[in-house]
Amino acid sequence: MEQELYTLLDGLLGSYKLYPSVLPLDVDYPCARYILIYDDFEQTKDPYLSGLARFQLDIYSRDRVGEKSAFDVAHTLQETIKTAVNGWSGTTIREIRVRNVEKDYEEEIEAHISRIELNVYHT
């Protein structure tokens, strides 16, 4: 299930890199990371939706890309991914639902962050 989600998100990010859990120190921006918050197999009795995993996707942007500001780059990626994944289903993923979206700024690395929380129902 996690590999299927990674493949989906990586494809949506295009040329920007996707990392599990932690960004490398020498990362190129914009980029994204995903974190598994929890995976609970007892959330549902429906045999087609046997597990619920919650993921957080953080999109980081520090620099302008063409005419777009760092904030706009992160926001555009957030909207693209949010629209594409909400309701998506695959092989082991039965359905993805966007749970929450938010924006933040991390002063330590001077980066805009667009965050998406996902509920991933899976087998």
Image: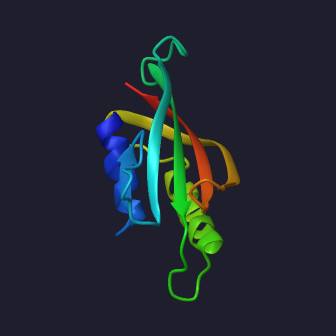
Give the left or right position of residue 75, taking residue 12 as reference: right
Which residue appears at 42% of the width and 39% of the height?
21
Q: How many numbered dots are placed on residues in this image?
A: 0
Which residue appears at 50% of the width and 11% of the height?
42
Give the left or right position of residue 23, taking residue 54 as reference: left
Q: Nearer the viewer, residue 12 or 18?
A: 18
Q: Quadrant of the C terminus?
A: top left
Task: Tell me residue 122's x, y (percent).
Answer: 41, 28
Task: Tell me residue 41's x, y (percent).
Answer: 45, 15
Which residue appears at 56% of the width and 57% of the height?
109
Give the left or right position of residue 65, taking residue 26 as reference: right
Residue furthest toward the bottom? 67
Which residue appears at 58% of the width and 60% of the height?
78
Task: Tell me residue 37's x, y (percent).
Answer: 52, 28
Task: Tell me residue 91's x, y (percent).
Answer: 31, 38
Task: From this view, report whether residue 6 is shown above or below residue 93.
Answer: below
Task: From this view, report whether residue 9 is shown above or below residue 34.
Answer: below
Q: Quadrant of the N terminus?
A: top left
Colour setup of the view: rainbow
Task: From this view, report whether residue 91 is shown above or below residue 101.
Answer: above
